[in-house]
Image (cartoon, coloured by chain):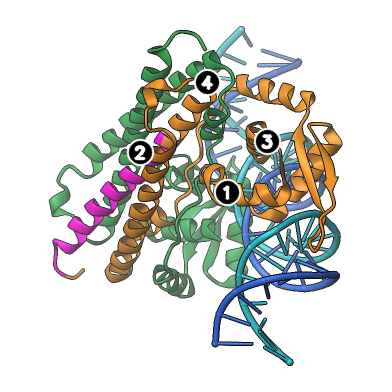
Chain colours: A orange, B green, C cyan, D blue
Amino acid sequence: MALDHAILVSLTERAASGYDLARRFDASIGYFWPASHQQIYKVLGRMQEAGWVESTVHEQHGRPDKKNYAITAAGEAELDRWATVPSGREALRSDFAVKLRGFRDREAILTDTRARRADHVARLAEYEASEKRFYPDPSALDGAGLGAWLALRGGIHTEERGIEWCDEILTALEGRGSR
Amino acid sequence: MALDHAILVSLTERAASGYDLARRFDASIGYFWPASHQQIYKVLGRMQEAGWVESTVHEQHGRPDKKNYAITAAGEAELDRWATVPSGREALRSDFAVKLRGFRDREAILTDTRARRADHVARLAEYEASEKRFYPDPSALDGAGLGAWLALRGGIHTEERGIEWCDEILTALEGRGSR
DNA sequence: CGTCCATATGCAACGAAGTTCATAAGGGTC
DNA sequence: GACCCTTATGAACTTCGTTGCATATGGACG
């Protein structure tokens, strides 16, 4: 049910077509809730039936028609309701941690860990670039901007800790001889 | 497909019934891959057909019979194969981050954040107790023990990072007046 | 000229995971 | 005596997400 709310949040920022949303989900909002375009179209259809969003079709020349979705009053009400529901802890499901726990192949883990570390570094750079660009002065933020910045800070913390963990693994495994 | 491997890893540590596994998943292994007993029974059945595990029935008096599962050579081979498959980055799906991003109700977010912080603190205490109890001298570890300790370290990093993030949110939101 | 990419929308099939329910015996609590 | 907890296994249903496919046009690359 949470993709519904992620889409609604995105639509409060600006009305959009399914295609636009899919691209947003490849970046910003998708950092915290990844989604494919198929999934997005499905949920948009469901939410339109529920009356949370409404669409207007824009004809285009040389391109497929575009359906622009906007959030309705009912959609806003749903977001308000959702805001008061406590959000339980996220279940962490880590293939990698299970693999570590079942330690079998030292070289494979090292390779995996180095790749993960590089991935964390790249993602962290993205986040930090976003922070610098969109929130250069956090103390001046309020409301929506403040929330978006705090969400991004969460991403930054996640990547920083991921890097620390990888370094700890590398130190522990490289420091000793073969298994 | 990853629950399969989590169960196999657990069975390499010690053979067990579905019920035993369900309890393990409520603690240790379940920290990184939560699963319900229904899910576990389903996967055990599937894996037995695939020949990765085998079961022996133990009759009990006054209690339902028990099916004890052990990993087979084919199961071990599957784990070896799986160990060499790089484990891509985990998609992070955070209801809470989406809620922050869609900042609507300051009080609701504060309440939520305080609850999350308490949860992280409690979980961190559990992890640290485990670490002290099972891995008092990490430098002496090797093989399976080393992997299990490093996995636990990952959990510890996750909770510490979660607490930091909550504190950052609380500081930012409490520091300013109402929305 | 053929192939790939961007724009734009979707359906169908499948798999993984969560929720609810069923069954069965013994022991403890109100 | 009625109800709940622990032990023990599992089926049925639903929801969510992934993967593959379908369709249509225009522009860039080789």
Q: Which residue is mark 2?
A: A157
Sequence order check, earlier mark of 3 and 4:
3
Does residue B76 belong to the magenta stretch? no
Q: Position of residue D11 (x, y in %)?
A: 76, 52
- Closer mark to the observer between disc 2 and disc 4: 4
Residue, x 37% and y 21% (percent of image)? A139
Does residue A154 belong to the magenta stretch? yes
Instruction: Please state the chain letter of the residue tagged with numbered disc 4 in the rendered image.
Output: A
Which element carries disc 2, helix, strand or loop? Answer: helix
Q: Are marks 3 and 4 on the same chain?
A: yes
Q: Which residue is mark 3?
A: A11
Q: What distance separates the C-alpha of mark 2 from that of mark 3?
A: 26 Å
Note whether A179 is above or below B102 in the view shown.
Answer: below
Instruction: Please state the chain letter of the residue tagged with numbered disc 3 in the rendered image.
Output: A
Note whether A144 is above or below A57 in the view shown.
Answer: above
User: Which mark, residue A143?
Assistant: 4
Sequence order check, earlier mark of 2 and 4:
4
Region of the chain picked out in magenta, as a range: A153-177
Disc 4 marks which amino acid?
Answer: Gly
Q: Residues within 10 Å of mark 2 (few under 14, many from 20)?
A: some
Tag 2–tag 3 contact (CB < 8 Å): no
Q: Position of residue A150 (x, y in %)?
A: 44, 30
Which element carries disc 4, helix, strand or loop? Answer: helix
Q: Position of residue B54 (x, y in %)?
A: 53, 66
Residue, x 24% and y 62% (percent of image)? B143
Sequence order check, earlier mark of 4 and 1:
1
